[in-house]
Image: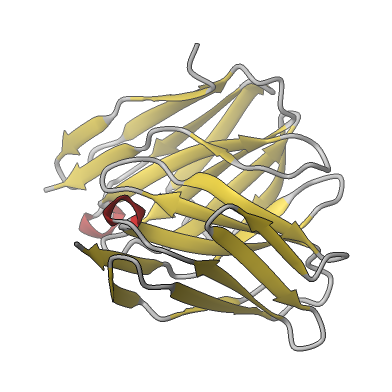
Amino acid sequence: DTAVSQTPKYLVTQMGNDKSIKCEQNLGHDTMYWYKQDSKKFLKIMFSYNNKELIINETVPNRFSPKSPDKAHLNLHINSLELGDSAVYFCASSPRGGPGELFFGEGSRLTVL
Amino acid sequence: GENVEQHPSTLSVQEGDSAVIKCTYSDSASNYFPWYKQELGKRPQLIIDIRSNVGEKKDQRIAVTLNKTAKHFSLHITETQPEDSAVYFCAASILANFNKFYFGSGTKLNVKP
């Protein structure tokens, strides 16, 4: 009964490959997010979707393409992976409006060799 | 967009001492300020939050203060314990139809036994 689940947890791949990370939430939230956490632990918002519609795209390279088939799922596809893409990617969700808490998934550690 | 600055980046205290982490934000429209704790290898989790209509909130050993005029807020942990060791993130958010969360750069707290 995990609230926000993402797969895979670990991903090791070569430069230039394409990979996807999947995220699902069973909390009934309207809004879902992707955050990138680099080696210095900085949590940077990448995308936010509200009920399948993109509402935030924080100057992320267009090699990153989020897809939300329904409001419970937000997947992240990355093309032509680069070394700098190595990070932990966190999916999160929050209810519409208040009370405001952001629920994070366990994270997906991506290593690009 | 919102810019959240957090200090210090690392903080080392003796068990039983107090710890204070400070954050500033730039967008006066921000109205919700959560604090997240991230233990090593785990997801960030909410520990306390405060809304813009409140100046202070306390939950056992943890308290948060907010100064809207100066646009800064702080986390106070009293009687620190080794299990408080973690990375702490402040965030600023605008609770509206579509919540947007912007995080500070994190503070690594080390509580020495």
- Looking at the image, the residue that sits furthest to the bottom is B70
Q: From the top left corner, tell me how far across and down residue A52 is, in percent.
A: 71, 29
Q: Nearer the viewer, residue B17 or B33?
A: B17
Tell me how many marks there are: 0
Tell me: B56 left or right of B113: right
Tell me: B39 left or right of B76: left
Say above or below: B41 vs B76. Answer: above
- Image-quadrant location for residue B43: top left
Would you say residue B27 is visible in this rendering?
A: yes
Q: From the top left corner, tell me how far across and down residue B111 is, in percent.
A: 27, 64
Q: From the top left corner, tell me how far across and down residue A41 is, in percent.
A: 34, 61
Q: From the top left corner, tell me how far across and down residue A37 is, in percent.
A: 37, 55
Tell me: B80 left or right of A26: left
Residue beneath the point at 86% across and 45% down: B97
Say above or below: B25 vs A82. Answer: below
Say above or below: B91 vs A69. Answer: below
Residue beneath the point at 76% across and 29% down: A51
Would you say residue B1 is visible in this rendering?
A: no
Q: Nearer the viewer, residue B81 or A13?
A: B81
Residue beneath the point at 31% across and 25% down: A8
Residue beneath the point at 27% across and 40% down: A109
Q: Nearer the viewer, residue A101 or B2?
A: A101
How does the figure colour the protein chain or chains?
Answer: secondary structure
Q: Nearer the viewer, residue A7 or B105?
A: B105
- Looking at the image, the residue that sits furthest to the left is A113
